[in-house]
Amino acid sequence: MTGLAETMKRADAAGRRFRISLTVTILSAFALVFLTVMGLTGVATYREAMQAAVAPADRQIAELTARTAARTAAVVDPLYATVAVAAKLPDVSPGTGAAITPTEAAFWGLLNVVPRARAVSAASADGVLLQVLNLDAMTADRRLAIMTGDTI
C-alpha cells in the first residue's frame, strides 16, 4: 500500500487518528461547489446556445417550405385543373379544318394560363393522341427539332 492508505494505517497503528487539515477541507469544499456551479453554468449555456441556433434555422425552413409549396401550387394547380376538366371532355380527336374541339380549346387555355407550359398532350383508350404545342414560346432550335417546317 502506498499513499493515503499507508499513512492512515501507520497513524492508526500509533494510536493517532489521521486528520485532514482545515485548509484542505475548506479548499476541497470550495472546489466541489465551484466545479458544480461551473458544470451547471456550462450546461445552461449550452442549452441556450442550441436554442439560439435552432430557432432561426426552424424559421428559415418554415419560410422555405411555404415558398416551395406556393411555387409548386402555382405551377401544378392550373395543370391539375385542366387535366381534371379535359378528362371529362367527350372527345380527344383533333378538330377538322379550322374547327377546334373543346379539348383543344381547354389545352390552349392551359398554355395561355401557364406560360412555362410548352405542350399539352392527351391520349384516348383507343390510342388517339392529341397534342397542342405553343410554338411561339419555344426557341427556334426547338421548333426545328419538332420538324414543324418553321424557319428561323
Image (tube, helix red, strand yellow):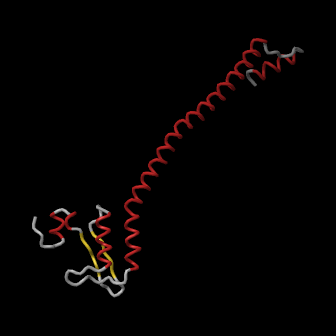
Q: Total marks drawn? A: 0
Q: Residue at x 27, y 76 (%)?
A: 131
Image quarter in which the N terminus is found:
top right
Q: Nearer the viewer, residue 61 or 78?
A: 78
Name the quadrant containing residue 82: bottom left
In the displayed structure image, the side of residue 151 where residue 137 appears, left or right: right
Q: Nearer the viewer, residue 120 or 52?
A: 120
Toward the front, the furthest residue is: 99
Q: Is residue 119 above or below residue 101?
A: above
Residue farthest toward the bottom in the current orientation of the protein: 126
In the image: residue 101, left or right of residue 17: left
The image quadrant that residue 103 belongs to is bottom left
- Point out the image quarter for the C terminus: bottom left
Is 66 on the left-hand or right-hand side of 44?
left
Residue name at image x 23 percent, y 81 percent: 99
The vertical placement of 67 against 9, above or below, is below
Point 55% across, 33% down: residue: 49
Instruction: Determine which quarter of the picture holds residue 23.
Output: top right
Relative vertical location of residue 46 with respect to residue 3 in this rendering, above or below: below
Q: Residue at x 68, y 25 (%)?
A: 37
Camera-side residue: 44 or 62?
Answer: 62
* Picture coordinates of residue 76, whole percent (x, y): 39, 64
Whole-percent x, y for residue 7 in the image? 78, 18
Whether residue 107 sits left or right of residue 4 in the image: it is: left
Residue 85 at x, y percent in the picture: 39, 75
Residue farthest along the left direction in this orientation: 151
| Residue 47: x %, y % from top left | 60, 35
